[in-house]
Image: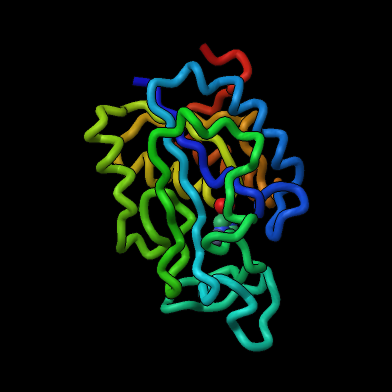
Amino acid sequence: MKTLIIVDAQNDFMPGGALEVEDGDAIVSVINRVLPQFDLIVATQDWHPKNHSSFASNHEGKKPFEKIELNGNEQILWPDHCVQGSPGAEFHSGLHTHPVEAVFRKGIDPNIDSYSGFYDNAHKKTTGLAGYLKEKGAHELWFCGLAADICVYFTLLDALREGFGAHLLLDAVRPLNATDFEKQKSELREKGVDLTEATGLR
Ligand code: VGL
Ligand code: ZN
């Protein structure tokens, strides 16, 4: 069963959004085109309360992209983004979401961030995604979405840990930091991720 995981294809990560990824909206038509090739399609959605501790605005004197220590973990502080119920938290309006069977929301606990679609950043709480996929009989997962070097990357690492076969659709992701993503691509390849393209997938 071919399974597609669409990571955080939300307005706030698109150009003009609160935490915009350069050229992020270019992934939408690429994803739409390959949807019919998948047997199961799941999406993740970054879904923060206003008081989320990953927002610089919730730390006196701190600015976005500064790093702090939060409950023993390093935390990059972000601009307010993907606030529950806000337009920025919605999926890009051009994305064909009808075939998406389930949406897994993450980053809801105000005290901890959650880059991966599977676990929070301290790996303490599951979103239920791994169990859902296993119960569905999914073994091979294809990944797309935003941002390539943050939430897609950490979701991929957890997919490997959970024993799934992982494929990364390079033309259906865009990074916040291109230099970081170049290094991560080599790491992911070494760990067994298949780096491929949606264009030409069959
Ligand atoms: C993301 C930073 C903060 C992402 C989410 O989806 O890549 N990045 N929250
Ligand atoms: Zn977030």
Judge whether residue 192 can be spotted in this image: no
20 lies above or below 79: above
Q: Where is residue 176 in the image (x, y as percent from the top left)?
A: 68, 51
Tell me the quarter of the picture where residue 63 sits: bottom right
Please name the residue shown 45% across and 73% down the image: 110
Q: Where is residue 76 in the image (x, y as percent from the top left)?
A: 59, 68
Q: Is residue 174 left or right of residue 110?
A: right
Is residue 184 or residue 80 the one in the foreground?
80
Q: In this view, does 135 lie to the left or right of 39?
A: left
Judge whether residue 35 can be spotted in this image: yes
Q: What kind of colouring is applied to the model shown?
A: rainbow
Number of marks in the image? 0
Q: Where is residue 85 in the image (x, y as percent from the top left)?
A: 54, 60
28 lies above or below 73: above
Is residue 152 or residue 178 the one in the foreground?
152
Q: Point out the image quarter for the N terminus.
A: top left
Please name the residue shown 55% across and 20% down the image: 34
Q: Position of residue 202 (x, y in %)?
A: 51, 11
Please name the residue shown 30% across and 28% down the image: 138
Please name the residue shown 45% across and 33% down the image: 100
Is residue 193 or residue 126 the one in the foreground?
126
Quadrant in which ligand 2 is drawn:
bottom right
Identify the residue at the far bottom of this view. Answer: 60
Is residue 198 or residue 75 the one in the foreground?
198
